[in-house]
Amino acid sequence: KAKDSGRNQAVYFSKVLDTEIKQKVRLEHKLKHALSENELSVYLQPQYNATAKKFFWAEALIRWIDKEDGFIPPDKFIGLAEETGLIHEIGLFVLREVCAFISKNEAYLTDLGIEGVAVNLSARQFFAKGFLDEIKQVLVEFSVRPEQLEFELTESMVMENTQHAIEIMHQLRDLGIRLSIDDFGTGYSSLAYLKRFPIHSVKIDRSFIRDIPDDQHDVEIASAIIAMAQKLGLEIIAEGVETQLQSDFLHEQGCSFMQGYFYAKPMPFQNVLELSHSESEQKSEA
Ligand code: C2E
Ligand code: MG
Ligand code: MG
Ligand code: MG
């Protein structure tokens, strides 16, 4: 009997595995197709400066709307794209879209106060051999200034091979591109390292913002991260700000830069251009 149930379990697990592999293969196939058929797009989420009371920067976020499955969130396919190497093509696509947009709308963006766009990088892109040259080429092709670009890195990415990561970070920094640490607080980077990274800013992970101001623990963590960033001379931006109370709390703690649904959701490029000054000023009064 015991043997039977063992066998049944094995059959069960092999079926689960089989389904998982099939789903993965299917998704990979669809993703390749989406890339070649131009079904991927890039959205921008404007970031708000609560002291100056205006948007000042934006983050690029990939979007995939599939004909059959509808919206497929990046968390569902970025990992797969990393595993399969498709991330190189996706990353280049995102960067080119962003640079084309900046280049075409430079005057308008300046008028809005949006100084540049942050792009998420994956480990595989960041450590790739030709990465730096590729970036330089794209900047030249679209005549975008490096100061108009930021790369968001994660702690796990730079802790993977810290020495090498710091070298690449310096090369990007020397070009003039800004660097930030995304999802800060969820990884393992020690304070000692943070000081050695040539970064411009840290982004407090959404998970610490969500339950502010009710959760005393998160209130303490967010305050500590803000204080630490200030001591290290780093800019700090909060992710996932959804309420006035969260915004007020962060501002009081000395964090002026915020990103979240309370200020703006990720939106197509065109909608960013339609943001008016009055809109951002109204919001701050609300
Ligand atoms: P992330 O870089 O931490 O991006 C912020 C995520 O938080 C985005 O999710 C954004 O839509 C979401 N968000 C922003 N404000 C709020 C808010 O107020 N409330 C809530 N609940 N969510 C908010 P999204 O677009 O689903 O992206 C998920 C992750 O996928 C990103 O996290 C990033 O790690 C990755 N990703 C997105 N685009 C790219 C890309 O072009 N390249 C790479 N390598 N990764 C990307
Ligand atoms: Mg990010
Ligand atoms: Mg993040
Ligand atoms: Mg993330």
Image (tube, rainbow, N blue to C red):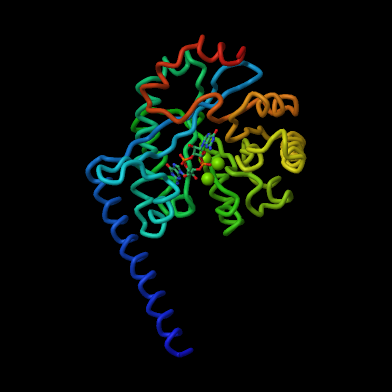
Q: Quadrant of residue 26?
A: bottom left
Horizontal arrangement in the rendering, residue 90 relative to residue 48 (left or right): left
Q: Quadrant of residue 81?
A: bottom left
Horizontal arrangement in the rendering, residue 208 relative to residue 59 (left or right): right
Q: Residue furthest front?
A: 1
Closer to the camera in the image, 174 or 229:
229
**x%, y% of residue 97?**
35, 34
Closer to the camera in the image, 206 or 226:
206
Q: Residue furthest top?
A: 278
Identify which residue is drawn at 55% across, 35% down. Answer: 178
**x%, y% of residue 249?**
72, 27
Identify which residue is drawn at 68% across, 46% down. Answer: 194
In the rendered view of the protein, which quadrant contains the C terminus?
top right
Question: Residue 80, relative to residue 115: is it above or below?
Answer: below
Closer to the camera in the image, 175 or 156:
156
Identify which residue is drawn at 54% across, 24% down. Answer: 263
**x%, y% of residue 280?**
53, 15
Horizontal arrangement in the rendering, residue 30 relative to residue 160 (left or right): left
Question: Residue 215, relative to residue 33: is it above or below?
Answer: above
Closer to the camera in the image, 148 or 28:
28
Identify which residue is drawn at 76% across, 36% down. Answer: 227
Q: Quadrant of residue 44?
A: top left
**x%, y% of residue 149?**
48, 32
